[in-house]
Image: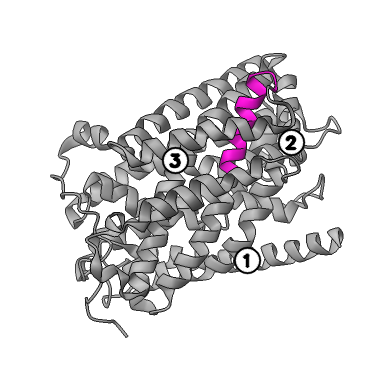
Amino acid sequence: MTMPDDKGTAALTGLPQRAVPQGFGAQLRGFGPGLVLAMTFLGTGDLISSSISGANYGYALMWTLIVALGARYFTISSIAKYKLQNRFGDHSLMAGFRRVWRGFPMFFAITMLAYGMIVQAAFLRAGTVGLFELTGRSGGEWGHFWWGVPIVLATAVALTRGSAFRFLEWSARLASIVIIGAFLFALVSIGHVDWSALLRGLTFDIPPDNGPFDALFIAVATIGTIGGSAANLLYPYFMAERGWDSPEHRPAQRFDLISGMLPLLLINLMIWVVAAETIRGTGVTISNEAGLAKMMTMAVGPAGPSLLWIAFALKAFTSFPAQAHGFARLTFDGLHLGTRRGEHFEGVTADPWFNRVMIGCFIIVPLLVTVPGAPDLVHISVFGTSVVTALTLPPILIGVLLMTSSRRFMLDAHVNRWWETLILLVIAAIGTWSLYAILTNLSDAIARVA
């Protein structure tokens, strides 16, 4: 049953609503939230999964990349649609989830707290790997930790002083340009692409297993659980920084999201091709960051690893702050909507505990992954996020489907058309299959370790 609009605006940011961008030039100047979101994806699964897939399976699983980004775009677009065009004036998707079931906000607050710390650990590890290797492994056994400290300090300062989102936008733009340039240089150095194999890789085929992860599991990881990633929920908070809160902002939001996803697609394709053309067929498999460095050496030569480490370091200064900011807002949004605490504050960032939790849980706690003996980057990225994803996948996909397809939630003129509902149904169905694959492979992996 639809609930009254008692706490629907609890997650207001306090930011003024901005004028609707008119024309291509205005939309281009407003471009930013989509790229910030896209660059947060580039470390949780894309950079790692695309490399592993290309190296271990060549082009055979490339169809998963197309499906992943298509499903991801449509799911995120639907999430943004609820924020802009719901009938209650909710400025938060979490408020919509509360209307589906009162327990969802606290469920997401708890799971996002855990999920955020896991993915932040992976991002921080990626950044410290880059700086550690670029500086000749200075610091020895504790080198990753000592390089993690300045990343943590810089992130805390950037997010608590001045315009944090402007910093996130410019760092995302810089990182996307440099990373695209690095892998474009690698492709030019290779000098060839097996186009016939690439085209065959767009067919829906699951090859025989090869490497430390079986093919089905890599397919699911690469697809990103078919658009059901919990990180998709961050986009409305980045939109709020632009002041996009009305139906009239929908065209600008669509342009922004497409513009952000295109660099992500390009980077993934290049990483995949580099891995397929260098590692595939050599007997070498990628299972950690050393394997990624080997791939770049084979593609470019001695300079290859440095290009990879630069990409990793840039990820630390894009994804790590963006995720800390986004997951803290998501966690407190759920907390405020799930309890009476939200009644006392005008927006989640006004809560005195907001910065404390953001810095403590999403910036400092991830330092634990940099101490000697911590798990390697690949296993953190592929396995660490799968557990929480298995919990959040059904409510995210089914909740978005229910909310955007019903006049109980959406303004009459903006309810999903039949084909939009059909696409979301297909994504939810494949996501359910993905959930089964995740649980099966995790069970098998635990059994092998035991």
Q: Which residue is label 1 attached to?
A: 435
Q: Give the Cα separation between the discs numbered 2 and 1.
A: 25 Å
Q: Position of residue 313 (x, y in %)?
A: 55, 28
**Does 108 lie within the magenta span?**
no
Q: Which residue is label 3 attached to?
A: 321
Q: Which mark is residue 55?
A: 2
**Magenta region:** 122-137
Instruction: Please tell me in which quadrant of the rendered image residue 303 appears.
Output: top right
Q: Amino acid at mark 3?
A: Pro
Asked if one can make out residue 190 in the rendered structure from this viewpoint, the answer is no
Mark toward the start of the polypeptide (2 vs 1): 2
* Callout 2 secondary element: helix
Q: Amino acid at mark 2?
A: Ala
Q: Is residue 379 above or below residue 75?
A: above
**Does 129 lie within the magenta span?**
yes
Name the residue located 42 percent from the left edge and 57 percent from the top edge.
Answer: 233
Q: Position of residue 285 (x, y in %)?
A: 80, 37
Q: Amino acid at mark 1?
A: Leu
